[in-house]
Structure formats: structure tokens, C-alpha cells
Amino acid sequence: MTKERPVYPFTAIVGQEEMKEALLLNVINPLIGGVLIRGEKGTAKSTAVRALADLLPKRSVVANCPCGCTWGDWDHACPMCIERKDTGEELEEALVAMRVIELPLSSTEDRVAGTLDMEHALRTGKKKFEPGVLAKANGNILYVDEVNLLDDHLVDLLLDAAAMGTNFVEREGVSFAHPARFTLVGTMNPEEGDLRPQLLDRFGLLVDVKAEQDTRQRMEVIRRRIAFERDPQEFCEEYRGEQEKLRNEILLAQSRMGELDFNDEVLRTAVEISLHLGVDGHRADLTLVKAALASAALRGREKVGREDVVRVSHLVLPHRMRRNPFQDSKLDTKELGEWLQERFQSA
Amino acid sequence: MRVTYPFTAVVGQEQVKKAVLCGLASRSINAVLIRGPAGTAKTTLARALDGLVPGERVINLPLNATEDQIMGGLDFEAALRSGERKVLPGILQRADGNILYVDGINLLPERLVHLILDAGRRQVNVIEREGVSCEHDCRFLLLGTMDPDEGELSPHLMDRFDICVSMAASENVDERMEILRRGLRYEKEPTAFLNEFMASEEDVSSSIRKARERAAYIIIPPGHLDAIAKVCHDLGVQGHRGDIALARTASALAALDGRDQIVLEDLQAAVPLCLEHRRNDPAPEQTGEGRGDQEKGGEPPQQRPPQQDREDMGDQAPSSDVESPLPPPPREATPKDQVFSVGRAFVVIDYIGEDKRAKARTSGHGRRDRVITSDRSGRYTRFQMPQGRVRDLAFDASIRAAAPYQRSRYRNGLAVVLDPADLREKVRERKRGTRVLFLVDASGSMGAHQRMVAVKGAILALLQDAYQKRDEVGMIAFRKNDAELMLPLTRSVHLAAKKLEQMPTGGRTPLALGLSKGFELLTKDRSCGVRDRPVMVILTDGRANVAMGEGDPFQEALSMAHRMASSGIRFVVVDTGTSLPRLDRALRLCRALEGTYFRLEELDAGYLAASVRAVMGR
């Protein structure tokens, strides 16, 4: 298998607008905290996530750093970069595209967290840290397919790293800490098991996907898929223009977002919605605002308003609503909009 | 330069801040536990302590830490270099004079929590392993956080925390807006944000340092000692740890306040910090009869299902008040199916004990959810000498074992030469759910007196329990002439609850058929790498009246039960019979299965406590 296997273009995915929006919002602002995509088999979940790779913007890193340390952020740099700096080495800046790093279900703990470099130890008798998947994921998107089937102790590792933004390794005689700030993207089929609430809360957004119901849409899905399989290169070529356009939109939205200002009304709306729906914890409030900002930026708006918060609420809140674990959590955006209307009119 | 979110920038959470400050101010308080759901700034608060008192760091103990990393072990680099056995400091040594932080301490293997608490209490860490022997000071404040939804710490570990506080998200709009505002600002311009709080951070830091000087000299008036003893007694605190913690915390509070003597307010403030996790008192509304006791005493701290049905709860109460004797046998002529709602769910006792005759305990978090795995999955917690062929090499430990002898070995260009005798094997532990199959009698007799409502409530409670322990659950309902697989073994408890809600009741009782179907399900799939002993929970009143073959239906079920008893499945029989005199059929079934027997209401963690209280109250 060659390394440059063509990836199905993001813009060629038929329908599934919600999922696409959720993913794009995260590309625009990685601080939203990722997305969990729930749905049956064969609903283009994995395709969409993998397709992101082609759209991701570049970021500035320390050249040759196995942990992908962000250039200039020395407070959070890994010990290897610090050491290189301290020994007087001239570090170089490199511009690399963000990547989608996959965490396979069968991964072992040492490969995820990183471990003792055995070869180095045997050859030189010295300890050296061998970075794992979490190091690779730093600054990138970490993708876990079937995330609900991930072993518990691996979930613990993910949670630890996500909470701290740092991966602390204390095992096999090595003690090491490196930055691990990643956007967590997971896909799962809910019939195969639940996700732990703690992990659920770590996902910024949640989307439920269903297969397209419209026959014509479904036919289009098949047609494109077959065309892609027959000649991937040509198929991608066909979509090159649209991909380029979307990439530009993302860049534009990113720069726009930096200038977007928000007022107290936005904050108040976010808080009121969370309280009204009985959402646990404060992460929901923060994510609501961040997602609203990204969403407004994506739509080319100059101001963020209450409607932006309402629009993203169905992505941010369903998985955070105080749950009886045995109830479906559904969010009625329309009802919510009306409630807010009333609430702010009376106030 | 500190880069963490400032301690004083955390909005609200006064109780938790107070707890942490006490821990920092007093050298004799060495373990603080913070409980709270996800997203309540537990981690933020803990990290904010890094460098709050200059020079004192937060040392992080990650969940992947192995035992030798925590305790310290042989330094193999030094051993290779000079053949000298030297200790490589572990996390505990690094924590000396600092704050040791464990995020999700309830997820850490229990024995590791033990080791840490022990070292913290003795303020010294004794290392006797891998041929090294040494000890070092380790005076640290252990700060643990946990989300109770992920499972509780066992009570004896909990008791060893001097202070335990709960953290909840603020419900106040303005406060929440302020939290948001600060969070967003910190993300955007961290440096400016940190500068803003520099002065207040300095204030806190200096008050901690002043309090430390004072803490050792705080006077506790005799009257207050009396009060401490009394309040601990009144709240039913077991042991003396509570009393001592209370005195220490009150002293710390006085010291933080700049006083030399404890006043009543200090005690009042210290009680919720020290005794909330230790109290063992009857809830105030406990009076008299069993029925009321059960309803109130068994009230779960968690959410209740909204479907709960007031009028049905009476049926779940112990039948101490004499009801009509046997309910009329269900009429076969009018087999009308009914779907009962789901009754009240409660906190379940540890009903699957490791030993066959598990004693009913009110706190059920034993070790049934931790398995030592024999394949290569799971968390590497420690190493051992291999038995037979080495399958999962603990490379680090093997090198350490070999290191001191390297000078005398022929190295052939290698840095390290391993001898077979050096090899060590990994011990992996894995939190793994048990397979639990619910075998539910859904026949007409279960419909009598709305019994099914209570049964469904009980199953829901058991499902919730399974959810926390990551069990795999399955459900088979037997009624009429069939045993239907309602739910194959799955980890989706959500799905199970849905099926439960829809489960119809009515018809006759093919007990034997149900048993054989359940047995088949649990024995057919043994492919998983872990030798686990699945559990079959049978909820029935035992009134079998449909046989698979000829002969008496109940005798048939019994003889089948005898044959199943030695199959490695653990059986739990829950007698759903309600009326007096009880028929002992479920009990006889249980004996045949060599299982554990409960009456339905005994599963309720609140029930036992309540009935004991009722007896004592008289």
C-alpha cells in the first residue's frame, strides 16, 4: 500500500450537514474540544473524519520535535525541546499541516502514553523516552473509531491528558511529561455500548447521524462512492476546486473569529440555557460560547448574537444534560428558542 | 513564571477552597479529597496550587503510574555504570515538601491508594524492593479528586482522608457568567490575566505561610475538645480519625484566621469538612415502622427515575404488617398481558460477593470489578517473578534485575546482558465488568399486587449498579411457554433499561426453560481472554408451573438447578414473593443452585440500615 492513498474528499460527502458543521467548527477553533459522532454503521462517520486531513490548516512547530511542540510556547514545551534549547542548540521553526492521528482500539498502554525505548536501553544502558500516540496527537486531531469500545484504562489515559493538556508518564522506569493538547474526535455506534459520562463530557460537541432517507440522495452517495473507488485520483481532482474553496473559508473564518467580539448577552444566554436544561458543570457554558463564536465566524458574521448560541446548543448540550443514564437525551431547539424569547422579553 | 490558572481567580467554591487552604496551612492534615461531577473545575483548582506557596509544586500522579515509579526502585543506569545499587527516586520522593495530586483517585488500583496514604500518614517512605533498601522523608499534602459517578472509594480508604468536600457547579447566573468571562479571558490573554491576580495570590500565599507558623501552637480549650468528641459521637463517626481530623482542621482554620485559639465558629466550619464522609447517623426523619423507614432511609442520593409511582411503593416494603396470605393463583383462563411501569430504583448492596455466602454489606465496592488479566491487555501495575515461560516481559524490571551484575558478565558489545534469571513479568490489572444475566420471571403471578413494578425497580437499580461497574448485562424473560432473550449480553445499559420498560407480564411460569436458556447463553461464549465467572441473577417467586418434559415443573427446575450448580456460574436468587407465609420455593431453588439468596427488599442498601435502626430505636 502506498503512503499517499487518496482520501475521499470532504466536500464530496452527501448531506450529513450537522456532522460536517460540527467538524468544521472544531477545525476553526480546536479549543471547542472535539466532537463525538454517534450513529449506525455506514453513515460516513469515519470517512468524514479522515477527510478532514485534507482541510486542516498549517501550524507552526518546533522542527524535529517528536511531541510536535508549538513554536514559541516554551512554557509548555516538552523536556526534549527544553534540553535542546538549554544545550544551546539552534531550534528551527517548521510549518506543518495539522494531522488526524488515529488511536486504534487494539493499542496497548505503552504505545499510547509512550514508554521506555528498549533498544536504546539495551544498546547504551541509558534510559530514553519513546513518545507514543498522545505525543503525536499534540496539536493535532486525535481520532478514536468505536470509542465506546476502547478499554477503560486507555480511556483513563485520554481523560488524564485531556484534563491537564499534558501527558504525564510514570512507568517502566521513565518519568516524563510532554504537552498533549489535542482535539478529540470519536465515532461510535450506540448499540454497542455506552460511553463513560466523564469521557462524554470531554467531547465539546455531539452529533447523531442517520443514513440519508431521501432516495435521490442515497443514489448520489452510491454514485460518488463508486466513482471514487474506480479512480480515486480523478475523483479527487474533480473536487479539488471545492476543497480549495472550503480551505479558504476555514482560514477566513479563523482570522475573523479573532476579531469577533461578544457581549454579556451572549454569556448570559449561554448560562441561562445551561441552567434551564440542568446541565452539569461549567464546561457546557464555555463550549457554547466558543462554538457560537466559531459558528458566527463560519457564517461570515461580524457579530455574535443570541441566535448563534441557540444554533449550536443542539451540538453542545444533549450529552451534558443531567441524565438518568437510561433516558434518551434529546434537545428541542425550537422549544428552547421559544423559551429564551419569553425569558428575555420578560426580563 | 507560573502559567496555571490562579487560585484566587476561581469563582465561588468557598468550601473547597477552605478545605485546600486548611491542608496547606496545617502540616498535620495530609490528605484532602474533592468529590464532584465532571466539569466543576476540580482539576483547575488543584493545578492552581502549583507554586501558590513559592517553591511548592503540584506533583502529578497519573493513573498509568506503576508501583515502582511511585515508591522508587533500583536506578539501573547507576547499576550498569558502577554495579552499585542506588535508589531511583519515585513519585513519593518528588512529592516530599510538595502537593501530591491524583486526578480520579477512585480509578487508581486500591493497593496503590493504600501505599500512598500510608506513606503520607507516616511521612516516610520505606523502600524494600529490587535489592535496594532505603527510606526517605515524604511530607506531602495528598490531594485527590474523584467523580462519584465513576464509582466510589471504599469507605476505609475514604476514612483516611482528613478532609472531604463535594464540589458542584454554581447555579447562580451571575456567578456562572463571571466564571465564563474569566475562562475566556484566561484563554485569550493568559499573561495579562495572571498579572491581574498577582496581588491576591500573594495575599493567600502569605496567609498560608503565617498560618503554618502559628498552627503548631493553637490552643484547643477543653470545652471544645468535649464538643468535638460529642459531635463525632452524635453523628455516629466510627473510630477516632474523625475526632482528630476535626481538631486539626479547626486549628488550621483558627491559624488561617490569625488566632491562637479555637473558637466555636472554627468547629462549626470544620464539621462539614471532616465529618460529612464519616457520618453514619440515622437520617433525622427515621421513626418507627419498617415501611416508612425503607422509603426514606433507602432514598438514593442519585436521581430517581421519573416513572416512579408512589402508590406502588407499598408493595416493596417489607411485609411486616400482615397482608392477605397467598395471593390468588393467576387465572390461566384470562391470560391478559400487562406492562408494568418501572418502580423506584435504589442503591444496591454488594450482591455479588466473591465468596458464595456474601454477607450483605451496605457499601458495595469490593474487588469484583478488578481482574488480573492473563493476556496482554490491561494496566501494568507491577512486576513479578515469572512462573514458567515469560509471556509478558517487564522490560524495565528485568533490566533493573540484571544491572548490578553487568560488570561480571561477558557483554559482547551490548550494554546490558540479560540472563534468564533476570527476567521479570508484568502483572496487569484491568477493570473489567462481570457478565451479569438477569433471568426475570415475567409470569402472571408476578403481576399480582403490582409486584412487577417493584421487581422492575429492583432490576433498574441493579442495572445502574452494573453501569457503574461496567458490567455486561443481558436479560431473559420467561413466561407463558417461552423464555425470550430480551437483550443479548451488552454493555449498553441504556438499551437494557429500554427493554425493561417494555417487558410485558402475564401467563404461566416455565422456570426450567428459563434456567436452561440462561445457562446456555452464559456458557456458550467463553472466548474472552479473562477467566471470569459470570453471574446469573434470577428474579422469581419460584412458582414453576410449566415443565419442559413430563412431571412436576418445580422438581424439574430443581434437578436442573442441581446440575448447573458446579458450572462455574455464580447464582443469585432474588425471591420476589411478597406475602406471608412465604413459600420457600425460591429458597429451595437457590440451595439447589448453591447460590446466594436475597429477598427483593434486601437488595436495597437503605433497607438493611433502616431495619437495624428500627430495631435499635425500640
Image (spheres, coloured by chain):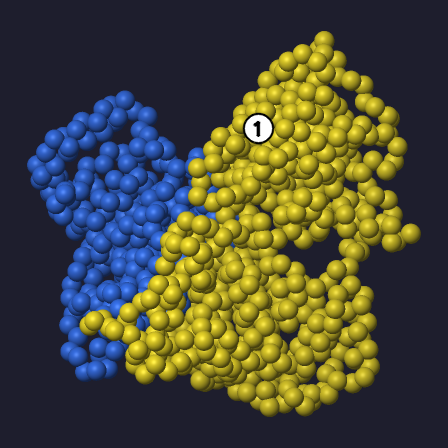
Q: Quadrant of residue A168?
A: bottom left
Residue A83 position in % (x across, y down): 25, 78
Whole-percent x and y of residue A91? 17, 75
Query: Where on the picture, by quarter, is residue B228?
Result: bottom right
Return the residue nearer the eye: B614 or B470.
B470
In the image, residue B58 above or below residue A243: below
* Residue name at image x 20 percent, y 62 percent: A59
In the picture, measured across the screen, residue B250 lies left or right of residue A76, that is: right
Which quadrant does the N terminus of chain B fall into? bottom left
Q: Is residue B585 above or below residue B301?
A: above
Q: Is residue A314 visible?
A: yes
Q: Quadrant of residue B212?
A: bottom right
Q: Is residue A174 visible?
A: no
How many discs mark residues in the rendered view?
Answer: 1
Image chain in yellow: B
Task: Chain letter for mark 1, please.
Answer: B
Instruction: Looking at this view, name the residue that lies furthest to the right.
Output: B618
- The residue positioned 47% from the left and 48% from the top of the image is A196
Circle 1 packing at 10 Å, graded few (<14), some (14-19), many (20+), is: many
Residue B154 locus on image (x, y percent): 62, 59
Left or right, B96 with reference to A60? right
From this viewpoint, which residue is outermost toward the top?
B333
Chain identity for the colour blue used in the image: A
Tag 1 residue: B518
Left or right: A94, with B549 as reference point: left
Residue drawn 53% across the image and 32% down it: B522
Residue B474 picture location, percent across and down: 54, 33
Q: Secondary structure at mark 1?
A: helix
Which residue is at a point 15% across and 66% down the rendered structure image?
A: A94
Label 1 is placed on what type of residue? Gly
